[in-house]
Amino acid sequence: MADNTMGSSTFIHPTAHISDNAEIGEGCKVWINVQIREHAQIGQNCIISKDVYIDHAVKIGKGCKVQNSVSIYHGVEIGDDVFIGPNACFTNDKVPRAFSTEWQVTETHVGTGASIGANATIVCGVRIGEYAMVAAGSVVTKNVAPFTLVAGNPARPVGMIDKAGNRISDASPNNAQQSNAQQNT
């Protein structure tokens, strides 16, 4: 790894595989068996836990916590202070075929302060709004409005939350319609 990719307060476990062309912010902790590919950008003070895969050119903001065995593929951009639970997975191909030679990356964006629960799958092409929360095991196939809690397969709005993640209301018909309208844009 190039000397200019990390500062003295950054910890990189000796089993981590980090491209010389990746950027790791000051104060990050990168744990056992992590792979970070070329041109990935990780902001300051992030924790990248055991067995995480970060594909090339992925962007992760500052203060994020990426838990064990998460896969983040090319085309994903993650804002600041995002929590990603264990075994969550992001996709990047809308029509995956092993034999396709002309597939295209479909981008996904996760807003500041959002939380993604364990084992959630984020299907490419969605936006997860600021401080939204995706329940464990959910499959996100449409946009998630800011401050909205979604759950299920497919994930649907089940409540509204505050910045701290506390549920402040159930998903009312108005809130659900607003979330669905934003999901379809």
Image: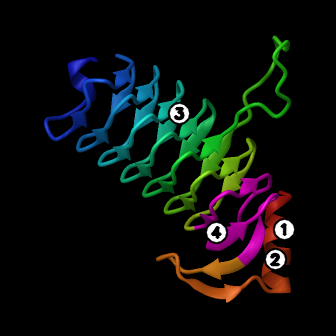
Image point 39% across, 24% down: which residue?
Answer: 22
Asked whether the beta carbons under mark 1 and mark 2 sit within 8 Å of each other, the answer is: yes
Q: Secondary structure at mark 4?
A: loop
Crowdedness near tag 4: few (<14), some (14–19) or many (≥20) residues, C-alpha within 10 Å: many
CA gap between label 2 and label 3 equals 31 Å
CA gap between label 3 and label 4 equals 22 Å
Q: Which residues are magenta?
A: 132-158
Mark toward the start of the polypeptide (3 vs 4) = 3
Q: Is residue 55 left or right of residue 29?
A: right
CA gap between label 2 and label 4 equals 12 Å
CA gap between label 4 and label 1 equals 12 Å
Q: Secondary structure at mark 1?
A: helix
Mark toward the start of the polypeptide (2 vs 3) = 3
Asked whether the beta carbons under mark 2 and mark 4 sit within 8 Å of each other, the answer is: no
In the picture of the structure, the residue carrying the numbered disc 4 is 146
* Percent position of residue 27, x then y: 23, 44
Q: Is residue 67 above or below residue 107?
A: below
Query: Who is closer to the viewer here, 127 or 16?
Result: 16
Q: Is residue 152 left or right of residue 66?
A: right
In the picture of the structure, the residue carrying the numbered disc 1 is 180
Image point 47% across, 35% down: which residue?
Answer: 52
CA gap between label 1 and label 2 equals 6 Å
* Percent position of residue 44, x then y: 31, 45
Query: Who is closer to the viewer here, 185 or 54?
Result: 54
In the picture of the structure, the residue carrying the numbered disc 3 is 58
* Percent position of residue 134, x then y: 64, 62
Mark toward the start of the polypeptide (4 vs 1) = 4
